[in-house]
Image: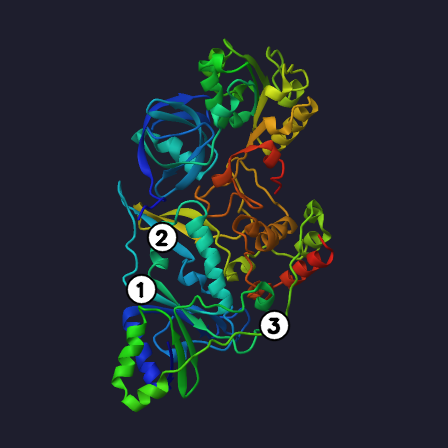
Amino acid sequence: MGYKIPREAADNLFKGLGKHYEIFAPKVFSGEGCFSDTGIIRYGTVRTLAEIEFEKKSDYSFKEALLPINETCLYFTENTSSVPAGEEKKRLIFLRSCDLHALRRLDAIYLENGPEDFYYKRRRERTLFVLMGCPETCDTGFCVSMGTAQTDAYDLYLKVSDTFVWADCKSKELSPFFKGFLEECEPETAKSVSLQVEPEFPKSNKESVTLPVSFSDDILSHPIWEAYGNRCIGCGRCNFVCPTCTCFTMQDIHYRDNEKAGERRRVWASCQVDGYTDIAGGNSFRKSQGDRLRFKALHKIRDFEKRFDYPMCVGCGRCEAVCPEYISYINIINTLAKEGI
Amino acid sequence: MNNVYLPFPSQVKEIIRHTDIEYTFRMSFSGQVRPGQFFEVSIPKFGEAPISVSGIGPGMVDLTIRRVGTVTNQIFEHYKGNTLLMRGPYGNGFRTEDYIGKEIFVIAGGTGLSPVKGVVDYFSGHPEKVRGMTLIAGFKSPSDILFREDFSRWEKNMTVIQTVDSAPEGYQGPVGLVTKYIPQLSVSDKGQSAFLIVGPPVMMKSAAAEVLKLDVPEKNIWISQERKMCCGLGKCGHCRINSTYICLDGPVFNYAKGKYLVD
């Protein structure tokens, strides 16, 4: 059901949502960017529509709203352990089409690959997703190439301007908020606010990729891995901004002021950073950055697909934008495709 | 909702000391378990470590642990509390039924003997179920030899070659890498043989190459991969090689697939 709501009324409606939901959306964090006097766009909780960055793509993806960077799995006291209670409030997460496609990849790992993940599932079941449109393409995204530019898997679509907010509500759970608003309107106004609303999706991107049709065994020794590997500093930023990277490390800690109590946590991990494959006794695998780059790139375009029948990469282009060494993931894909590997 | 990350307490029933840093912990456990599967063993506030099952008996599993990291250090320090936390078993493990009626050759390097030991134990107890059995086990030095008591039991009904990479002068037993002893193996029917190779990656690769030289088909070779397994549940990603999750699809692989597991 679609609505065109005057901005002030929409702001009130949004406040109403905030009473029932914890709302996560991309926000500008001024002064927190990598360089001095720059900001960064990442996820945080919001109470008003005005706080949400609708225009620019977020530097970090929505995944931290569903998979915390650092999540407590168990609390330990002397001889007992307990599972942390889940969040009281349900969640609304604002995201774009590419990210909504990434959600399917997160579900694949956390709900389908082996047994269901307790912590992911309990949060996921209490989360609704709000689509933000992309009237203009972002700079580094290639969602059109990856087939992730459009989606209808959202619970709510929102588009904002200074004077109006357009909404398409698909969720039964959220529709009472809109119906309540309609009931408060004059009958004449109510007619004018109900209309068909179609999300805005990008029709083309500045960047495009062609996925390799097949992969030969020679791919392991392709010179691009060494060339980019020599430049890679192994910082793992490409993993942390990626909406489809899901790796974590289990980590136990004890509290500094009480050694008898502590936690078991899981913390985001990066396949590009030292220590990722270390096993007891000192062995490790994929020691060079080139091998690690290959491992990651091929997961995104080949290995995940072998298991789940669709590529892992959703073409959001965040890794392309964040790399401090200007390693181009887009160029990697296109080079492999061009050389017919 | 079932929380697969919750460990259960398991009682330490017995400790078997092999070397200063390698003990077998005999733990209470009464569920289904196969040789080569693994448990995530944990000490709260220190962490979890994946440990393979090195023996199976009524109401118990053996976990042979080497003291090489934060968690295993703590296990050695604190097992006197008589219980450890565990979750599992995880992974596919060795299917003993795949080897029935065959001539079995087990080639193990160091602690690689642990995951395959359950298979050796099983057929040592049921020699009538196989055509024959040979064990080649290599250790770094005589002081690194594990499962000494088991070896004297196994020697009674199978061919055992227990070798060490290097030894002080005057050492009586065989010396040299396990691969040295593969060419001299006589395989009565190559089609009906089963080679189980477990150890460090380089050792498995070179041992498999030697076995293939004997004209044994690669589908008659099995290997078990060791990887960092933080979760054991196909989530954490650390053990993945290409499209394979060692914790879910392995750690035991037929060599026809296993040879493609290249990091």
Q: Which residue is mark 2?
A: A119
The percent coordinates of residue A16 (x first, y second) are 28, 76
Q: Amino acid at mark 3?
A: Asn
Q: CA distance from mark 3 to mark 1?
A: 34 Å
> Are tags 3 and 2 found on a single chain?
yes
Can you identify the residue that label 3 sits on?
Answer: A205
Quadrant containing the C terminus of chain B in the rendered view: top right
Instruction: Give the chain letter at badge 1.
Output: A
Task: Residue A284: give its label.
Answer: none
Compare residues A198 and B65 and report the one nearer the observer.
A198
Residue at image location 64% in from the left, 67% down from the top: A208
**Callout 3: chain:** A
Q: Nearer the viewer, mark 3 or mark 1?
A: 3
> Given contact means CB atoms under 8 Å apart, are the residues at marks 1 and 2 in contact?
no
- Subunit that carries the residue with mark 2: A
Residue drawn where x is 48% and y is 70% of the image: A96
Q: How many marks?
A: 3
- Nearest the camera: A226 or A168? A168
Q: Residues within 10 Å of mark 1 (few under 14, many from 20)?
A: some
Against A212, is B19 above or below? above
- Counting residues from the start of the chain, the first of labels 3 and 1 encountered is 1
Discs 1 and 2 lie in a common subunit: yes
Residue B227 visible at all? yes
- Image location (x, y in percent) of residue A82: 28, 47
Query: Who's the residue at 32% across and 85% down the image?
Result: A9
Residue under numbered circle 1:
A90
